[in-house]
Image: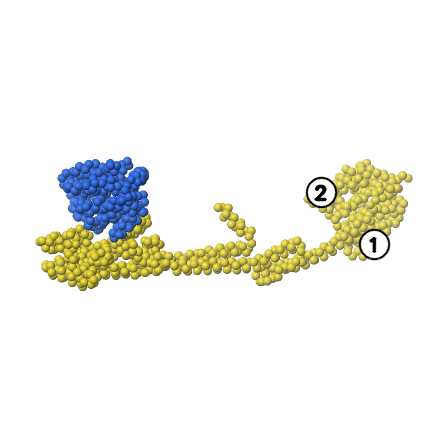
Amino acid sequence: MHLKIRIKNKFRLRILFLFLIIFNFIISTCRSEELNKITFIPHWVPQAQFAGYYVAYEKGIYKKYGIDLTILKGGPDSSSVEFLEKGKADFANMWLSTAIQKRSQGLKLVNIGQIIQRSALMLVAKKTKGIHKPEDINGKKVGLWGAEFQIQPKAFFKKYNLKVKVIPQSFSVNLFLRDGVDVASAMWYNEYHSILNSGINPEELTTFFFYDYGLNFPEDGIYTLEKNFKKEPSLSCAFVKASIEGWLYAFAHPDEAMDIILKYMSLAKIPANRMHQKWMLERMKDLISPQDSKTPIGILLKTDFLRVAKELKENGFIKDIPEFESFYRECSVHAEK
Amino acid sequence: MNLSIESVPYMLKNRGIAFKLIVLITLSSAFVFLIIFSYNYYASRRMIEKNVGENARNLALSTVNRIEIVLRSVQAVTGNIACFLENSTSKKEELLKFLQITVENNPEIYGSTIAFEPYAFDKKLPAFAPYFYKENGKIRLKNLQDVFNYNYFILDWYQIPKELNRSIWSEPYFDEGAGNIMMATYSVPFYKNIKGDRQFMGIVTADVSLEWLREMLLSIKILKTGYAFLISKNGTIISHYNKELIMNETIFSVAENRGDALLREIGRKMLRGESGFIPFRSIVRGRPCWMYYAPIPSSGWSVAVIFPKDELTEDVVHLTRTVIFLGITGILLLSIAVVLNTRSITKQLREMSQAAERIGTGNLDIELPPVRSGDEVGKLTAAFHYMKTSLKEYIAKLTETTAAKERIESELKIASEIQMGILPKKFPPFPDRTEFDIFATIKPAKEVGGDFYDFFFIDQNHLCFVIADVSGKGIPAALFMAVTRTLIKAKATPNLSSGELLTKVNEELCIGNDSNMFVTIFCGILNTKTGEILYTNAGHNPPLIIQDGGKVKWLEVESNIFIGAMEQVNYKTDRIVLHTGDALFMYTDGVTEAMNESEEQFTSERLEKEIIALQEKPVQEIVAGIMKQIISFAHSAPQSDDITMMGIEFKGSDY
């Protein structure tokens, strides 16, 4: 199954890559000599989750698109939403659910590229705790992260009518490993692999991907303020296109991408594990590649938008669902203007 | 396959002794050497591995103990604080003082906090967590509720012991505040009984620098490059000589990187608190090693000591190389010794085989190799010498004997020729005499025999004819025959009857006949005018008379003793008158006693029968016919006696 998808993706990626090269050529011949200085903040510390941006930066892809980019250091102390809101960053990475909430709250931000198509959020449990299906979670201690990380689990609990004891979960999986909780939240590309690399075998774990339970919340997307976009849509789209090209390059050259990521992790003094980052990059490829091979990377589907917005509204996170057309600006439309 | 198996001995079969010995001795000594060497190598390795197992176990356990002592002392101190908190109702100042003193008095503790549940210490405080720590030798206070923005409750050091309701060591971490040193925190939950309900109040922690632990582990040097490493409860590498790995890799990420499922299983065993001695590929370079791993019970970490296999067996390998060198040299020397020794043996054998070949061609004068030793080859050489001498002597003797025999034989031959030469051989002997027809033949046996015949005229009308057989064979018989014949001729005078003639001959022969030889004689005197024959038979076979008209009968004879045996014997004379056409057939016992292959004799009956068949023929043809019959009868059987026949036919007088 996976193999098939990958082969399809590879083919599709190649076509896209070719297209981008031609596009670059047109752009570079037309653009002015002066580079646009812009800033971008990922919503977490450097890791393979953001490989595309670091690779595009390192490989000079942004410059090729006329952008002089500065990647700001994201992380628990630097909220990407806040940076965008306060004008500390021109572009920011954030979850779709976060962005819808912010838009609904009145922050005029726009999605200019939905990078991740598939939700990587999951629940994981040890089979030794007798958890094999959603119903088994009833009455168990479940570790949940804060805010937007709780939307899907709570909808999931509601769907299966589960009463659980929610334990706030930190960024480590130690609580789960020491059996402080029966079920833990995990990102497929991150915590799940950390658990595996703490000596627990996949067959000893039961996993619940929200994606599989009708709760697919596409996650990482590229955002900018609406006013910025309106001022210079081509710049925004150049940034998105350069970023996507960076992703494609990273998927095509995973070892080089690894080296780049590990370099940034080392600079940020974050414990780095090559195998972990390799896993993360491979999962990012799975998550970013659209299911429909005709769809290019970075498109936000209205169905996905509406699903997330509906769940947010039903759970009381938002009062009104923002208008899709004003929330999402598809670059393929705007770039030509 | 079959071919090669069979061809090996076949190949060997035709090779020289030296080659066989070299192959055999070299191969078998190499085989023995190999067995001894392999056993030695195997046994040495086993011994070393056994010792390594012991050493590794001791080293790991002593390391574990040293770590345990420190960790347990920290556990005790932290436990004491928790105990104090559960049993006192101290004010804030007393609490802080107590905590400060505890940190001050325990050098192994870097810092300690008492973190309370929301509003547990003070009904107005949503969080309270004073933290005393050491900085540049001074004790400082920090309020963690401020550091963590009133939310330390979800941090591992707080949340895990709280949820588990038990004390626990945290995963080691790098503490930036303390100068980026590795630390681990021991957390003890404490409780208070409120209205009979044991209620969770907070967590007491003690931070311990793990630098001493890492230094201790790094100071463990095993052989040349062996080392010790430590992994945490999550499998994270805490201590390793390669700093890159520390906190970045877990034993499982290393296993994933190597695709090594076995290493992953080892890691799981280590985390399960098991201990064991196993073959292991080192984390960085993947070298084959022995590893002993043992858990640190209080923290759930695991210590491993690594013994590189090649370094362990370095001495054995050295020894093995020397032994192999010595072994090969030994086998080579052995082969050379075998070559030299077998050469000296085979050289003599070769010389002897050449000598034997030449002796075979009859050359007995060749030099034989000298007898060099008393061993089998020496004895063989001596035997050859003896054989050569004996052969030479024998051949010399044989040559001599043969020469003598040849001389005698040639003399005998001459004698035989002389003997035969003296018998009348010309037929018809008297061509002018038509009254009778006479024919005689003699076929001598191989040896010189004693048969003879003779006929001569005594006077004008009297023909004396004799057929005789001397007893014995050889020269004496020949001589005796010659003497007898000469005597008969000498004594035959006219007017002497055959009996008187033989009496005279007997007298003469008896004189000086010391060898007791004798002769059988049939002697007749034919009156050629009348056909009258006076005859005497001295012990001889009686002749056959063939009468004209087809009648054949044995001649009636007066028996007389043979000549030469007894003196003064008067030999009687018989008389018969032959008519014209009658014939007399005389023979010796060589005729009737002629034998065929089945040792049957010709017999007188057969002779008579054959004579009857030939009676019409002239005497010459009768004699020849009988001879033919004898030859065909005897076929290939050798002739043992002279065959002599004589026939005389009276044809009548013309006048």
Quick check: B116 left or right of A219?
Answer: left
Give the CA separation, mark 2 to mark 1.
41 Å
Q: From this viewpoint, is residue A204 visible?
A: no
- On the rendered structure, is A56 left or right of A183? right
Q: Give the quarter of the image for residue A164.
A: top left
Q: Residue at x 77, y 51 (%)?
A: B413
Q: Chain of mark 1?
A: B
Q: What residue sits 21% from the left and 38% below the top? A: A328
Q: Which residue is mark 2?
A: B635
Q: Nearer the viewer, residue A83 or A215?
A: A83
Visual hue assigned to chain A: blue
Amino acid marked by disc 2: His
In front of the other: B628 or A179: A179
**Quadrant of image for the C terminus of chain B:** top right
Who comes first in sequence, dot 2 or dot 1?
Answer: 1
**On the image, numbered disc 1 is attached to which residue?**
B508
In this rendering, the answer to whether B602 lies above or below B333 is above
Q: In front: A60, or B642?
A: A60
Question: Which residue sits furthest front?
Answer: A33
Mark 1 lies on a secondary structure that is helix
SS for callout 2: loop
Residue A249 appears in view: yes
Q: Residue at x 15, y 42 (%)?
A: A105
Tell me the chain of label 2: B
What kind of residue is marked 1?
Glu
Tell me, what hue is chain B? yellow
